[in-house]
Amino acid sequence: MKNSNQSTNKNVLVIYGHPDTESYNEALAKAYIKGLDSAHASFEQIKIHELNFNPNLKYGYRLISELEPDLLESIEKFKSADHIVWFFPMWWYGYPALMKGFVDRIFLPGSFFKYQKGKSFPDKLLKGKTGRIVITADTVRWYDRWFMKSPAIQQFKKGTLQFVGIDPVKVNYIAPIKDSAPGFRKKWLKKIELLGQKVA
């Protein structure tokens, strides 16, 4: 789905990483899109749970796994995007398996990065794009940062997005979600909506 009322040159890609359509992550993503709509921004969406694909990169990079149509379409959305926003929960110091499978299948050599002979690090093929991570958790931020060392953020921001050139990547860490009050959730929905209005 693409908003056709454009008043900005920035194309935004919104990615739903939670497999549950009734999750708070879904509500946050919808709030962000509400903000984009009010700003007449151009945007696309990827709802990973709606895609038809095998999340298992069966052969790694040894053999090529043929990409399903939904993944090919997703890659094109990445290429046309200027700003990429991810919504997902932190589970077991990481992120949901379905989202991990999606990343494994499309963040491929030749598409998002390119190995260079004699060089320690590959070329980043998504340079020029910016990103945002909106991550929910039950772990309070100070414990995640100082004791856990922010594993999900480190893995995804530095080990994935910045590895392929998406930079800067801003982070909104929303926690704790478990037993959170309605006022807490409404406050964050409004904050995320305002981020969509600013397209940042």
Image (cartoon, rainbow, N blue to C red):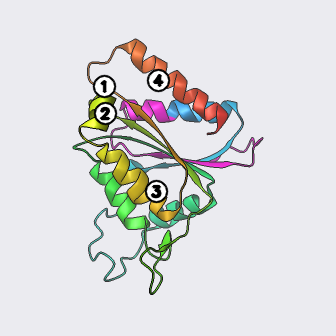
Q: Residue at x 27, y 77 (%)?
A: 59
Check disc 1 and give the amino acid type.
Answer: Pro
Query: Was residue 33 drawn as part of the magenta stretch in this picture?
Result: no
Q: Is there any visible trace of residue 95 in the rendered image?
A: no
Name the residue nearer the viewer: 16 or 195: 195
Q: Residue at x 75, y 49 (%)?
A: 9
Count the numbered circles shown.
Answer: 4
Q: Seen in the image, is 104 located left or right of residue 186?
A: left
- The residue mark sitting in front, 3 or 4, is 3
Distance, label 1 to label 4, CA atoms, is 12 Å
Q: Position of residue 65 (x, y in %)?
A: 36, 77
User: Relative to 58, does residue 55 appear above or below in the rendering?
Assistant: above
According to the picture, the residue beneath numbered tag 1 turns out to be: 176
In terms of secondary structure, where does tag 4 sit? helix
Q: Position of residue 89 (x, y in %)?
A: 33, 39
Q: Is residue 22 above or below residue 132?
A: above
> Disc 3 marks which amino acid?
Leu
- Label 3 Cα crowd, 10 Å radius (few <14 / some 14-19 / many 20+): many
Q: Which residue is mark 2?
A: 137
Q: Mark 4 or mark 2, which is nearer the start of the sequence?
A: 2
Residue 101 in view? yes
Residue placed under numbered mark 3 in the picture: 161
Can you tell which quarter of the image residue 37 is in? Answer: top right
Q: Position of residue 143 (x, y in %)?
A: 26, 32
- Start-end of magenta stretch: 1-29
Residue identified by numbered label 4? 188
Q: Amino acid at mark 2?
A: Ala
